[in-house]
Amino acid sequence: MDTIHACFKEKIGEVLLPGDVFSFRLPESGDGSIKSEKIICGPGLRRNGEEVRVCKSGILRHKQPNMYWIDSQQRRYVPAKGESVIGIVTTKSGDVFKVDVGGSEQASLSYLAFEGATKRNRPNVQVGDLVYGQFTIANKDMEPELVCIDSCGRANGMGVFGADGLLFKVSLGLVRRLLAPQSEIIKDLEKIFPFELVVGMNGRVWVKAKTVQQTLIVTNLLETSENMTSQQRQTLFKRVAEGSL
Amino acid sequence: MRDTPLSNCERLFLLKAIEQKKRLDGRETYDYRNIKISFGSDYGCCSVELGKTRVFCQVSCELVPPKDSRPTEGIMFFNLELSPMASPAFEPNRQSELLVTLNRQLERCLRNSKCIDTESLCVVSGEKVWQIRVDVHVLNHDGNLMDAASIAAISALSHFRRPDVAIQGRDVTVFSPEERDPIPLSIYHMPICVSFAFFLQGSYLLVDPCEREERVKDGLVIAMNKHREICSIQSSGGIMLLKDQVLRCSKIASVKVSEITELINKALENDRKIRKEGGKFGFAESMPKERITTLKRDEVPVEMTDVKETANDIVNSTETTTEAVPSPVLVGMGTAQIGEGIVNSWALEEDEEDESQTEDRKTDEVMLISDSEEEEVVILHEEAQKSTNTSGEK
């Protein structure tokens, strides 16, 4: 009995607006076999008693076996627990750094939350440096907290970085496309020339290539590939690759 | 709200790029961004886009008593406002240093250069003069607000028309725009600000800095020029400049100003021509119309089970056609007549004709009956290119 799945299925891939409702009427009590289904409502969907409401405008997406979410476009970041972001250190006060992550509040980062940091051995972080970290606390009632260390105590790629290179901002939708497992944009970009890339879920991207010109090229390509179809993007990248050779 | 701070790596990268003569958006060192000037439907309303920086200006006038020290001169009042929608760093009702600097610079630019003839604004000496009020609003901040504000202010002043007045003895009659055409202000020349940004203790120079470049710059020189006459120079940031650097800047500025003045004049001319021809003018016309209006509808399944029976019924119930006339009847030399003439159908209502047509329609054709007023896909590229817009593009 998958009435719920059927309800959702006909709307997968369609544009939904806030206020759209999926209501599931429970079957009559005479029916003996009532299987309980578990649906995971992702961002943009909210349960409201017996119905699921859409609260963001976007396209309904589905992932097997039972995950549904709304794919929406926005540029402003709202901190969420577990997401890895690029932050800029703004102040150093005592034991805690204040980091700007693009949200409404600055996040706090303790100096002990780095790999190999002790009270005697402080990490080398200055004001204005870039840090890549994860949120441990990020809800609407408290100040968000970042750490540059995972649960085992290892850095795992996080920490201070970026003496060189360029930081720029893109929309959150593009960031998700870049971070997808088999991202076409990254694959296409790799073919042009080698570069280092750090992508934060708050829309910030850091790029470093061998020369300043190449870094600028990658920056501009990433910024423009937001609104292009994959066809247009591939022709553009091909043109750039031929031009730079 | 606070603005995002500039990270060290951005600063270093920008300076390194400038050393190699590269800018973030690929411009050359002396290049301006794309300037777009458009006028609104009211006189004196102007919007200027310098790349992504957007500035809006409105000029208005009022009859007031003059200042005691200058009874025969009109009054000019300038006001620049940083709207919070321009940047997260701008908060409403807060006097920041940037606001004061911009206001002061705009005043010096337009008032002290005497570009407007204030004597002509006098109506009755000592009693009534025109007060011209220039309000500039910054709508989006992407660097170089001063240039955009000065271009907007002088364009709006050139575009503005004040009401006509007639003086008979001590009576002053102010005519409304319908009674008599409003008169333009008498403007002697067009002063325009050109901003320069210096980096690394004055070794490198950039024209028209964008927002990120502005954060990294050391000092800034604004020189204003019209016909190769400097109206004002301002240097901020405490940077030491050599004499030949300042001279070089003024030479660059004179070239840029002549280009910008030509652009403003072209935009004004366009607008004037459109108004005279009676065409549509205003902001709505100067926006490119890349409109996609579509009505997408999914395929509608059609019930086809009893099509054959319905078709047969319809065919059987229609009237039999009239018999064909066997052969033409010869009327005269070279003239033949086939059948009788039919009744003149011009006076018939159109409904009757439609009904006879729908009966014969085949049923396997899906009819889209919709009274929606939306059009099909319309992409008006060609219209946007040849549209008579009032903007001048660089």
Image (tube, rainbow, N blue to C red):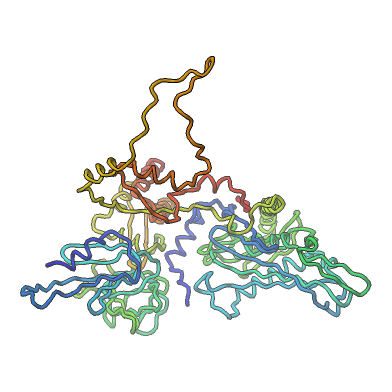
Closer to the camera in the image, A173 or B278: B278
> What percent of the width, then of the height, locates residue B160?
73, 62
The answer to whether B105 appears left or right of B305 in the picture is right
In this rendering, the answer to whether B189 lies above or below B69 is above
Closer to the camera in the image, B267 or B197: B267
Closer to the camera in the image, A61 or B140: A61
Point 37% across, 69% down: residue:
A130
In this rendering, the answer to whether B348 lies above or below B236 is above
User: Residue lying farthest top?
Assistant: B333
- The quadrant of the rendering that contains the C terminus of chain A is top left
Point 73% across, 60% down: residue:
B158
> What percent of the width, then of the height, locates residue B115?
78, 62
> What percent of the width, then of the height, locates residue A68?
23, 66
- The quadrant of the rendering that contains the N terminus of chain A is bottom left
Q: Is residue A109 visible?
A: yes
The answer to whether A119 appears left or right of B277 in the picture is left
The answer to whether B102 appears left or right of A231 in the picture is right
> What percent of the width, then of the height, locates residue B226?
74, 56
Q: Quadrant of residue A66?
A: bottom left
In this rendering, the answer to whether B77 lies above or below B113 is below
